[in-house]
Every structure is written in C-alpha cells, then in structure tokens.
Image (spheres, rainbow, N blue to C red):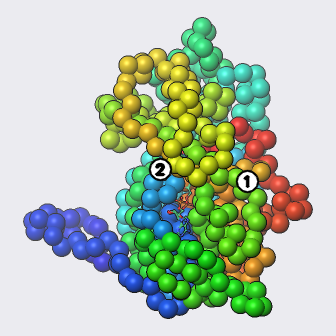
Amino acid sequence: MRRFNAFNLARESLRGHKGWGQQWRHPEPKKEYDVIIVGAGGHGLGTAYYLAKEHGITNIAVLDKGWLGGGNTGRNTTIIRSNYLYDESAGLYNHSVKLWETLSQELNYNVMFSQRGVMMLAHSVHDVQSAQRHIHANRLNGVDNEWLTPQQAKEYCPPLDISKTARYPVMGAALQRRGGVARHDAVAWGFARKASDMGVDIIQNCEVTGINRAPSGEVTGLETTKGTIGAKKVGVVAAGHTSVLMEMAGVRMPLESYPLQALVSEPVKPVFPCVVMSNAVHAYISQSDKGELVIGAGTDSYLSYSQTGSMHILQHTLDAICELYPMFRRMRMLRTWGGIVDVTPDRSPILSKTPVKGLYVNCGWGTGGFKATPGSANVFAHTIAKDEPHKINAGFNLDRFRTGRLIDEAAAAAVAH
Ligand SMILES: Cc1cc2nc3c(=O)[nH]c(=O)nc-3n(C[C@H](O)[C@H](O)[C@H](O)COP(=O)(O)OP(=O)(O)OC[C@H]3O[C@@H](n4cnc5c(N)ncnc54)[C@H](O)[C@@H]3O)c2cc1C
C-alpha cells in the first residue's frame, strides 16, 4: 500500500495519480477465520484494526450486507465530545477523544478531526443547573468543560441570537473546547485501508443470515449470502440491526431501533465557527468544510427499520434553527437522510461478552456513537482478544440490565449526540 506523504503526492501528481492502487482488497471469504466482525461501520472496522495492531490477530473478516461505512457511520452529523456526566462514560468517551487527536497520523489517513469546540446551550434554569453539574463532574474526571455567559457564547458563535426577546432565550452555555467534528467517511476508509493492509478481509455485500452454534452452545460460524463461514469468535457491531442479529443466536437484547434524521443546506462561505447543540429544543448545527450547514434532528417517536424519518421532526428542527440563528432563515436545504439507531434503556452503549461463548456485542450507541469510534473499537478488540473486558468498558456490560447497575445518561442529558 502506498503511503500518503509529500513525496508520494508530488510523484503521483506527475503521473496523473495512476499509481495509488486500490485502497483495500476485495477478497472472497475463506472457509474459516479466527474472528469475524459483523458490520463494516467505523466501530467494526476499527475493532478489526486494533485486533490486528494490538493483539496480533490478523485472520479476521469484517462482513457487511452493504458497502463499508454505509450505515450510521456515513449518515451522522459527526459531533465529537466527551463531556458526559458519569465516571464510566467520561472514561470511555475521553479515551476516544485522546485517540481522535492522533488518529490521522496513526492511520496515515486524514480523518479531518477539527477541535473547533462544542457548545451546549442552556435555555432555562433547569438547563443552567444541569450544564453546571456536568461541568463540575467533567472537571473532576479531567475532562475539559467550561461555563460561558450569553455574551461569551455569542462571541464564540456570532450567528447566535441572544436577544432577551428571542423565542429560546440563551441563559448561558457549556463549552468543551476539545470537542469538534471529523470526516465520517474518512474514518471508515482509513480504518478499512489500514486493516486490509494488515491482512483483514473486508467482505462487502455479504449479509449474515444465521449464527451457527455447536451442541455445547459456543459459536462455530455464520450463515451468509456468500455461504457458510466458520469462526472461533464473532463480534456483532451492527448498530440498528443488532437485535435482529443477536436473535439469530437466541440472545434477546435490551434495544429499541428508531429512525434518526439529519440534513444539510446549500454550501456557503465559512459563517459558523464551532458546533452548537441545543438539547432543550433539539437542534444541533455545524458547518462542513464544503460549506454546508450540517443539521441534526431528533429521533422519531416510533420504532422502525425504515431509513426515512417523519417530516414533522425535520420541520421542528428547522423551526428551532431559524429561531436560534435568524440569519439562516433564507437558506435552502440540499438533502436529508436517516439512519437506524439502537437505543438502550439507560442511553449508554453495550460493549460486552454475551451468554453465548465466543459471541461478543458492541451496540447501543443510539444517537451518539460516532464520537466513540476509536475508543470503542480499541476496548472492544481487547474484550474479544482477551475474552474479558478492558477496564474502560467493564461497566458497559449486558448484565447491568439484569443487576440494575445502570449508567443512566438518559436521566443526565436529554440528547446524546
Ligand atoms: C442522523 C444521525 C446523526 C448522528 N449524529 C451523531 C453525532 O453527531 N455524533 C455522534 O457521536 N454520533 C452520531 N450518530 C450516531 C452514530 O452515527 C452511530 O452511533 C455510529 O456511527 C455507529 O457506528 P457503527 O459502526 O456501530 O454502526 P454502522 O456504521 O451503522 O455499521 C453497522 C453496519 O452493520 C451492517 N449490518 C447490519 N446488519 C447486517 C447483517 N445482517 N449482515 C451484515 N452486515 C450487517 C450495516 O450494513 C452497517 O454497515 C448519528 C446517527 C444518525 C443516524
């Protein structure tokens, strides 16, 4: 694989860029693998990469029913932050932010991680109290987060309307300066390229239709649209379709799947310097490097596997965006799409062994798993390789829904993007 560097770029520019080659191989599946990962999103591809890099396991396949990065990884609004309330969450998401900071160099692939700051608005006394509670908890956990007055929030984000007569009065904001955004596709492509180079087989258009188990119960392989493939260990990393897959092994998951939508505007010159979220009115916004405003909406209120969400959800979000940033009222929206997010009762993820020997699951990221991609993949690879959780994901086990030891970020924040 040719490295991306100044010398190779100059060389290729003189040769019409014909020498870069394919970014990853397109192999047919082997008869058997040591590990199969189901789902070629960022978390699945990242898991394969860290299994190869940190645990020396390279006889791995990553299977996807579609194209790699075509699930929620390629559909999200790319907000990255780690200012969650509870110790376990701070540990997991901050591990991820630290990995984001060097990911482009590590993968030799520009994931365009931009720490432009994530600001979360407070519109009521309750919001103010909740944001300040988060700030104190975050600081105790070594996570940066600070309080801004309305005037300071306006200085950080000039398009914001902080007038006293605004529909949604801004009473202050919490700012995590190390938060930001990254290029979602590049994350999937970067992990895929590096994993493939280390020997991982990435097999696209290969749907898993069954999970095979020995009479003694352990996993022996998978039924797929490309035939039976043997495996000593299987990691399911399938976001909104996790419960469908786990059902194939007889494991009932504490998950609900909802459509979640986003949209982008026509591209304009740089006008929006940071990421702003408003949990109370449920609208969040940033500007992509192409110039489009990237806007996220809320989940639909009904369960579904359809990637088309409801119109009224989008309309509510755009109403809120126009109230908060009046200068965007005449912008045209370019396109909208949806993804199926997997939501747990406590709104925290599951990175866990399962009651079936050799079967592991990474899911429950709901509306907010993109930010966790490298951290989640890193500790999930450890869990699969060692057959025991890493200390960072020990609390995020399946068992907590039986024991009641929940990590209740649902009560801590209304939204988890
Ligand atoms: C509109 C939207 C906005 C979001 N905004 C943010 C945000 O701003 N910040 C944030 O942190 N998170 C956000 N998220 C959440 C984030 O996108 C996800 O949590 C994260 O990308 C999940 O990654 P993944 O690799 O686990 O799943 P995915 O990328 O969805 O990958 C799962 C893969 O499994 C495959 N699969 C499913 N069933 C099968 C099968 N039977 N056989 C083979 N393959 C199968 C799918 O094809 C898919 O490619 C958002 C999500 C959406 C939809």
Q: Is residue 213 left or right of residue 186?
A: right
Query: In this picture, is 37 found above or below 105?
Result: below
- Give 250 or 135, whichever is nearer the viewer: 250
Number of marks in the image?
2
**Residue 25 rendering spot, x and y as whole percentages:** 35, 78
Q: Residue at x 74, y 83 (%)?
A: 357
- Give 279 or 7, whichever is nearer the viewer: 279
Residue at the spot of label 2: 75
Sequence-first disc among 2 and 1: 2
Residue 266 in sight: yes
Residue at the spot of label 1: 344
Q: Is mark 2 within 8 Å of ligand 1?
A: yes
Q: Residue at x 15, y 70 (%)?
A: 18
Amino acid type of the residue that numbered disc 1 sits on in the rendered structure:
Thr
**Residue 37 rendering spot, x and y as whole percentages:** 56, 75
Provide the secondary structure element on which disc 1 rests: loop
Q: Is residue 127 left or right of residue 291?
A: right
Amino acid type of the residue that numbered disc 2 sits on in the rendered structure:
Arg
| Image region (quadrant) for ligand 1 | bottom right
**Residue 42 rendering spot, x and y as whole percentages:** 50, 63
Which quadrant is home to the N terminus? bottom left
Residue 54 in sight: no
Disc on res. 170: none
Q: Is residue 248 left or right of residue 397?
A: left
Q: Residue at x 77, y 51 (%)?
A: 345
Query: In this picture, is 405 found above or below 394?
Result: above
Which quadrant is home to the C terminus? top right
Q: CA distance from mark 2 to mark 1?
A: 20 Å
- Give 275 or 301, whichever is nearer the viewer: 301
Quarter holding residue 162: top right
Query: In this picture, is 124 found above or below 398?
Result: above
- Badge 1 crowding class, 10 Å Cα cut-off, few under 14, some 14 to 19, many 20 or more, is many
